[in-house]
Image: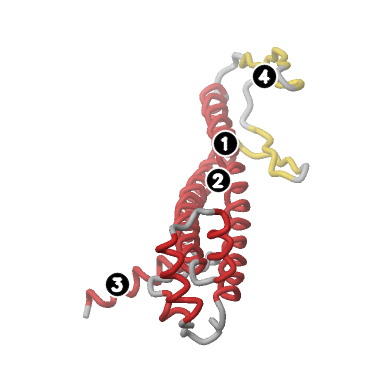
Amino acid sequence: MATTIESSNAGAASKKKHLGIPEAIFVEDVDSFMKQPGNDTADAVLRKLDEQYQKYKYMELNLSQKKLRLKSQIPQIKQTLEILRHMQKKKDTTDPMATHFLLADNVYCKASVPPTDKVCLWLGANVMLEYDIDEAQSLLEKNLATASRNLESLEEDLDFLRDQFTTTEVSILSLKWRCPSFVMYTVRLGKLPRSRVKFLIRKYIILD
């Protein structure tokens, strides 16, 4: 009983993890699949699968863009944290901190920063707030943990999405041999052996 509950919980967690990404249908038995309600013709089913495939492509584009943003944000957060830790060491001293600040792309200027316990952080949308160094460090560490966790989740979602691509492509290929127009098109291209043509015509076109 405990094993059943654990398996059920694991399945529910997996569904929640990939929430929003529908699982692809694997067509193992074409004949049984075509007898299901709504699967009137191979052409109609192929259109549905192609629509689903295009949705997967759109999801992949969005997830890939999010992944790129996170991969660019994480190094920036780490770099800012290093600066804050250095300022933390210097704040109780009287010696100014020598540094460089960015004027423009690839253009830096030397600067001397007096010891301070305050910093300003960009929050986005042209908003900057002043924090104590300890508060800023705590905030950035939390943001880094969240960004790393989100990146890991995105990579898992992309892997899951690629599996759905493969499953859908295999299902489409299986069903295409069920579609007379595709069979005849392949025959005209000379890419189908005559023995295979006779089998397909006998099994799917004439008998159906």
Give the SS element for disc 3. Answer: helix
Q: Residue at x 59, y 72 (%)?
A: 48
Per the model, the C-alpha gap separating discs 1 and 4 is 21 Å
Write the residue at 72% across / 14% down: 109
Amino acid at pointer 4? Val
Q: CA distance from mark 2 to mark 3?
A: 33 Å
Q: Which mark is residue 127?
A: none
Whichever of labels 2 and 3 marks the residue nearer the N terminus, that label is: 3
Residue at mark 1 to residue at mark 3: CA–CA distance: 38 Å
Tell me the residue at 33%/75% (across/down). 8
Mark 1 or mark 2: which comes first in sequence? 1
Q: Residue at x 44, y 61 (%)?
A: 194
Mark 4 / mark 2, whichever is N-terminal: 4
Q: Is residue 84 above or below residue 185?
A: above
Please say if the residues under marks 1 and 3 sit with CB atoms less than 8 Å apart.
no
Position of the N terminus by quadrant: bottom left
x and y percent of residue 133 in the render?
59, 35
Which amino acid type corresponds to the residue marked 2 in the rendered image? Answer: Asn
Q: CA distance from mark 4 to mark 2?
A: 26 Å
Query: Closer to the N terminus: mark 3 or mark 4?
Result: 3
* Sequence-first disc among 1 and 3: 3
Which residue matches tag 4?
113
Q: Which residue is mark 3?
A: 7
In the figure, is residue 162 to the left or right of 55?
left
Disc 2, SS? helix
Q: Which residue is mark 1?
A: 77
Q: Is residue 74 left or right of residue 58?
A: left
Amino acid tagged 1: Ile
